[in-house]
Image: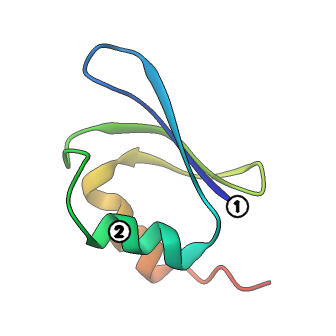
Amino acid sequence: MFRLTYKDNYQVERTLEFADYEELMLSLSGCVTLPDTLLISSLTLNDKVIYQGLVGDLYRFLSQTNFSD
């Protein structure tokens, strides 16, 4: 399971959960809900942090990383 954590414009911590890689990628390639300049506190996979940075760089990171066991 992927868990995306960030602080919104009101500095409220938000967490989005995705069952698998395909669901996460679909959410990023669909309607844009998070601005590219938003800082992601953490993206975790099975409770291990795999990414911290801008939303705008997340799609490229995910598409270039192999998540198979």
Residue at 70 percent of width and 61 percent of height: 1
66 horizontally vs 27: left or right:
right
Is residue 13 depicted above or below 62 in this figure? above
Q: Position of residue 42 (x, y in %)?
A: 55, 41
Q: Which residue is mark 2?
A: 59
Badge 1 amino acid = Met
Residue at 26 percent of width and 45 percent of height: 34
Residue at 34 percent of width and 72 percent of height: 60
Is residue 66 depicted above or below 54 in this figure? below
Q: CA distance from mark 2 to mark 1?
A: 17 Å
- Number of marks drawn: 2
Q: Position of residue 51 (x, y in %)?
A: 53, 53
For label 1, the SS is loop
Q: Position of residue 28 (x, y in %)?
A: 33, 65
Is residue 23 depicted above or below 46 in this figure? below
Q: Are marks 2 and 1 in contact (CB under 8 Å)?
A: no
Q: Residues within 10 Å of mark 2 (few under 14, many from 20)?
A: some
Q: Which residue is mark 1?
A: 1
For label 2, the SS is helix
Residue at 40 percent of width and 45 percent of height: 53
> Who comes first in sequence, dot 2 or dot 1?
1
